[in-house]
Image (cartoon, rainbow, N blue to C red):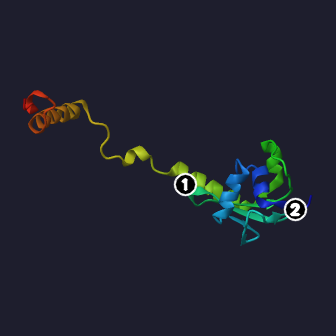
Amino acid sequence: MDRLRIDKWLWAARFYKTRTLAAEEIGKNRIQINGEVAKASREVKAGDRVAIRLGGGLERIVNVRGLSAQRGPAPLAQQLYEETPESLAAQAAARERRRMGSEPALSIEQGRPTKRDRRDLDQARRSDWGDRWSASLDDNDTD
């Protein structure tokens, strides 16, 4: 076997869990082979350069080293491709940005209400509801 469909190769190399997911990503133009947008039926061969655009603006660029029509264990799947140094550097930079990013909890200006705040809220609800609304059937009876 010297050629294989790209959707099947992406599945066998464990980039996507199913061939359907791989084909959907290809349909969204997120996969390029040798700089050209790929279709699901496009065949790859050893030596091709595949660019895979992932979420978060990250792009993995791999060189195809081998072909397999079967999905195997992860260590064997990793032998089907070799990631380029630029791609590895971009992944490391993205990991560092995520690690050094701000703590999401620090952006919250107002957190959970304190016990005093809850009491004030409960008091306000009790006073407002009584003035506006009555759930009693006795008030609305017109017998």
Front residue of 143 and 88? 143
Mark nearest the camera among 1 and 2 is: 2
Image coordinates of residue 75 in percent, x first then y, are: 80, 44
Q: Quadrant of the C terminus?
A: top left
Tag on residue 97?
A: 1
Residue at the spot x=13%, y=28% of the render? 136
**Few, some or many residues within 10 Å of mark 2 (<14, 14–19, 20+):** some
Instruction: In the rendered view, tell whether residue 86 sits above or below residue 135.
Output: below
SS at mark 1 in the image: helix
Image coordinates of residue 50 in percent, x first then y, are: 75, 63
Tag on residue 3?
A: 2
Front residue of 120 and 87? 120
Amino acid at circle 1? Arg
SS at mark 2 in the image: loop
Distance from disc 1 to disc 2, alpha carbons, whole Å, reads 38 Å
Q: Quadrant of the N terminus?
A: bottom right
Residue at the spot x=73%, y=67% of the render? 38
Image coordinates of residue 42 in percent, x first then y, are: 78, 66
Amino acid at circle 2? Arg
